[in-house]
Image: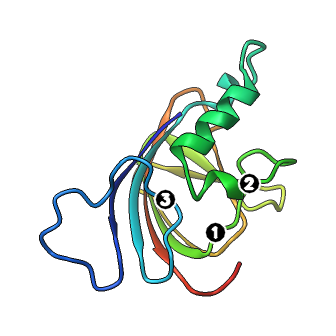
Amino acid sequence: MTSAVLWTTAPNPEIDVEEAAPPGVSWHPGPGHTVLAVVDFPPDSVMAQPEFDFASAGAEQMQHLPGLAERFERDNPGMHTTQSVDYALVLQGKVWLDLGDGDPSLLAAGDVVIQQRTRHAWRNQGTDPARVAFVLIGTDRDS
């Protein structure tokens, strides 16, 4: 899995900012802040391999997904709830949106989803990687 925060803004952002997403910037925007990120989701089967190291993957998420990794549920990998309105645009491949109701929705390149502080997880039940762009808009309402 690879991910990158490309840009962030604060409320009433500066216009002439050279780098608004330095390394270590939080993935979870505060009220009025925004985050633009792109995530490549490998097939879920990658995590099912016997040699997959969950402890190392968890430590890597804490390092590379600050502000978001802490929201992942321990008993349901990938499931989380954010205090943001999220626009998700599937750029490549297929990905499944799991809302915890037992029936994940299949999304393909070109599909758009709007999440409003919804408990969810992104899953790749296919055989090829999927790429999704996210715009997260922080709210002041607790999840």
Which is closer to the viewer, label 3 or label 2? Answer: 3
How are the colours assigned in the image? rainbow
Query: Total of numbered circles in the picture?
Result: 3
Residue at point 68%, 27% (across, down): 56
Residue 122: in sight, yes or no? yes
Please state which amino acid type lies under the numbered disc 2. Met
Residue 136, position as x, y percentages in the image: 46, 68
Secondary structure category for the residue under label 3: loop
Q: Residues within 10 Å of mark 2 (few under 14, many from 20)?
A: some
Contact between marks 3 and 1 (CB within 8 A): the answer is no
Please tell me which residue lies in front, 61 or 130: 61
Residue 121 can be seen in this image: no
Q: Residue at x 56, y 41 (%)?
A: 63
Question: Compared to 114, does 38 lie above or below?
Answer: above
The residue labelled by disc 2 is 79
Q: Are marks 2 and 1 in contact (CB under 8 Å)?
A: no
From the viewer's side, name the closer residue of 53 and 49.
53
Q: Nearer the viewer, mark 2 or mark 1?
A: 1
| In contact (CB < 8 Å): disc 3 and disc 2 | no
Mark 2 element type: loop
* Three-letter amino acid code at the position of disc 3: Ser
- Image-quadrant location for residue 97: bottom right
Q: Amino acid at mark 1?
A: Thr
Q: In percent of the image, x 52 and y 28: which residue is there?
A: 128
Q: In the rendered image, which residue does mark 3 sit on?
A: 26
- Distance from Cα at disc 2 to Cα at disc 1: 10 Å
Depth check: 10 or 135 in front? Answer: 10
SS for dot 1: loop
Q: Tell me how far mark 3 sits from mark 1, CA to CA.
A: 13 Å
**Which residue is the site of mark 1?**
82
Q: Position of residue 112 (x, y in %)?
A: 46, 63
Assess disc 1: are there few (<14), some (14-19) or many (≥20) residues with their C-alpha within 10 Å of its C-alpha: many
